[in-house]
Image: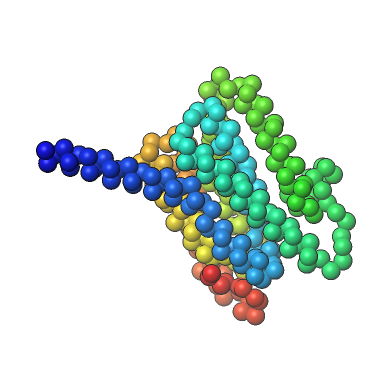
Amino acid sequence: MDWVISDELSLTVGHVVGWVSAAAMIIGGVIPYIPQYRQIKRTKDADGFSLLVCLALLVANTLRIIFWFGRHFEYPLLVQSLIMNVTMFVMVHLCVTIRNRKQLIQARKRIFTDFDAKHFWNWSDFQSYLDCMLLFTIASSLLMYLFIDYMVFVEIVGFLAVFTEAMLGAPQLVKNYRNKSTEGMSISMVVLWTCGDIFKTSYFLLRDAPVQFWVCGSLQVTIDLLILLQVYIYKTNSDPNRTGAHRID
C-alpha cells in the first residue's frame, strides 16, 4: 500500500513540476522585456535598444509556429511563440512612438511600401512593421503548405526558427560594441535573458525537444554572457548624467 501511495505522490509531483515548467516557458520569455519597456517609457529614450532584437524574435517565433504544422512539438512552446510575437509588437510600437516624439523637425515618412532597403526595419509608422511581418508570414506559410511532405524542408524551417532566436542578442551585442557603451540598454533585461535562456535550454534537453532547439539554445546563452561581459568592459564609458543610464529596474 505504501509503495502505491508513494507512486501516486511521485506522479502528482511530476505533474505539478511539469505544469510549472510549462507555465515558466510560456511567460518566461516575456519577462525580460518588462524592465526594458519600463526604462524606455520612463526615460523617453529608445536609442539604446536595438529594434533588430524585435525583428529577430518576430521572425524566429513566426517560423517556429509554422514549423509546428510540419512537426508538432509541445504546446507550451507554441503558445510561447504566439505571446512573444505580441510582446515584440508592443515593444516596436513603443519605440516608434518615442522616436517620432523626439523628432524636433518632422522628417519625411519612411514606410514599408517604399521598399527602400536602406531604411528596412527603420520605418516611421507602426503599420509598416505589421505589414512587413504579415507579408513574411503569408510567404513562409505558403512555402510550408507546398513542401510540408518534405521533411528536409520542415527541419530546415525548424533550424532557421531556433537559430534566428539564438542570434537575437547579436544586434544588441553589435550595437554595444559600436557605441563602446551599454547606455539605454536595460541590464535587468539581459540578466533575465540569460536566466531564461539557461532554463529554456535545460527544458529542451529534459523534454527531448528537437535537437535544433537545445543546440541553438546553447548558442543563445553564449551571446547573453558576452553582452553581460560588455556591461563590465564598458562600465567606465557610461555618462552618469544621462537619465536611466545603467539603472537596474
Q: Nearer the viewer, residue 163 or 107?
A: 107
Locate residue 101 relative to residue 107 in the image: left or right. Answer: left
Q: Is residue 113 shown left or right of residue 168?
A: right
Quadrant housing the N terminus: top left
> In this orientation, does residue 233 appear?
no
Residue 195: horizontal and vertical position, in percent? 44, 56
Q: Residue at x 58, y 22 (%)?
A: 148
Q: Residue at x 69, y 64 (%)?
A: 47
Find residue 127 and report its horizontal and vertical position in percent: 77, 48
- x, y (%) of residue 61? 58, 41
Which residue, as the protein is rendered here, is positioned at the far top?
Answer: 149
Q: Is residue 181 left or right of residue 203?
A: right
Residue 73 in view: yes
Splitting the image into 4 quarters, where does residue 91 fall? bottom right
Residue projecting furthest to the bottom: 241
Against 227, is 67 above or below? above
Compare residues 83 and 152 and report the one nearer the observer.
83
Q: Residue furthest left?
A: 1
In percent of the image, x 59 and y 62: which residue is there? Answer: 36
Q: Residue at x 54, y 65 (%)?
A: 187
What colour scheme was applied to this rendering of the protein? rainbow
Please state the horizontal and vertical placement of residue 218, each as a whole percent of the image. 45, 47
In the figure, residue 133 lies in which quadrant? top right
Tell which of 138 and 14 is nearer to you. 14
